[in-house]
Amino acid sequence: MNASDELLKKRFVELAERADRTGFFTYTPFLGLAEQDVLMRMRASLPIPFELFGGAEGCERVVCRFGTEELFGCGEGWPIALLKAAPVSMRFAGALSHRDILGALMALGIERSGTGDIVLIENTAHIFCLERLAPYIEENFTKAANTVLKTVRETELPEGELFRLKSETLNVASARLDAVAAAFCRLSRGDIRALIEKGLVFVDGRMTENGAKELAPDAVVSVRGCGRFIYRGEDHVTRKGRSAVTIDRYI
């Protein structure tokens, strides 16, 4: 484990001990998959349970809250805001990408840990962020990739599915992680194993080192640089003895 991970572990312990000592919830900023993996490996050694939430079901980036409503006997809202950044003129707006939105936010001096998932729907960005940063972003996030934006706070999630899924059937040698992930990314199994060795493949928020692992139904697999999918299970075995498996791809 590197020095950065050690500092992260120390911070998790500090927050957990403070919540345990005071009886008040403590929170982290938004955590990426690698940070979530460090946290999950510490679960048994922490003095208090925790919960994870990113602002909506299906979010990949999440905030950790140390303490639970059952333990403290009371509830508390999450310090997460949702903002909508839409082109002032759809007619003259360029096609925005996730990178455009994230890059413009970082240009405002906002650290990545201050923002969660960014979802683009019909060229409008829905941005999860820490509550304390919401007023600043709302006031100053006015442009991305030469497109002028108007940013406002959303009081509820957009209608319909926030995270869109596309069902697909993959023809694979087996339901092993490396086989399914290779078909999903259109890479060789050797390429996927290399990504696994680099710590770039996660199953249900945990970094994995085992490409031979059999995927369980409804496992969420993230491959950095390729995307993520929900493994739904084997549909049938082909005449050639291969497995036809169903996945839901996040699009």
Image: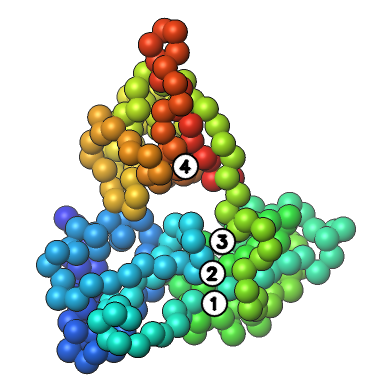
Q: Nearer the viewer, mark 1 or mark 3?
A: 1
> Which residue is tagged 3?
118
- Residue 226 in percent (x, y) is at 48, 40
Q: Is the C terminus in the top left, top right, bottom left or bottom right quadrant?
A: top right
Q: In this rendered view, identify the residue nearer to me: 232 or 147.
A: 232
- Residue 245 in percent (x, y) is at 45, 27
Label 1 vs 2, first from the N-terminus = 1
> Which residue is tagged 4?
229
Contact between marks 1 and 2 (CB within 8 A): the answer is: yes
Q: What's the residue type where badge 1 is placed?
A: Ala
> Which residue is tagged 1?
81
Q: What is the residue that sits farthest to the top in this orientation?
A: 240
| Helix, strand or loop for disc 2 | strand
Q: In this rendered view, identify the residue nearer to me: 39 or 238.
A: 238
Would residue 211 be visible to someone looking at this image? no
Q: Nearer the viewer, mark 4 or mark 2?
A: 4
Residue at 44%, 79% in the rendered image: 78
Cα separation between marks 4 and 1: 25 Å
Contact between marks 3 and 2 (CB within 8 A): the answer is: yes
Residue at 46%, 26% in the rendered image: 235
Q: Is the N terminus in the top left, top right, bottom left or bottom right quadrant?
A: bottom left
| Helix, strand or loop for disc 3 | strand
209 to the left or right of 85:
left
Q: What is the residue that sits farthest to the bottom in this orientation?
A: 22
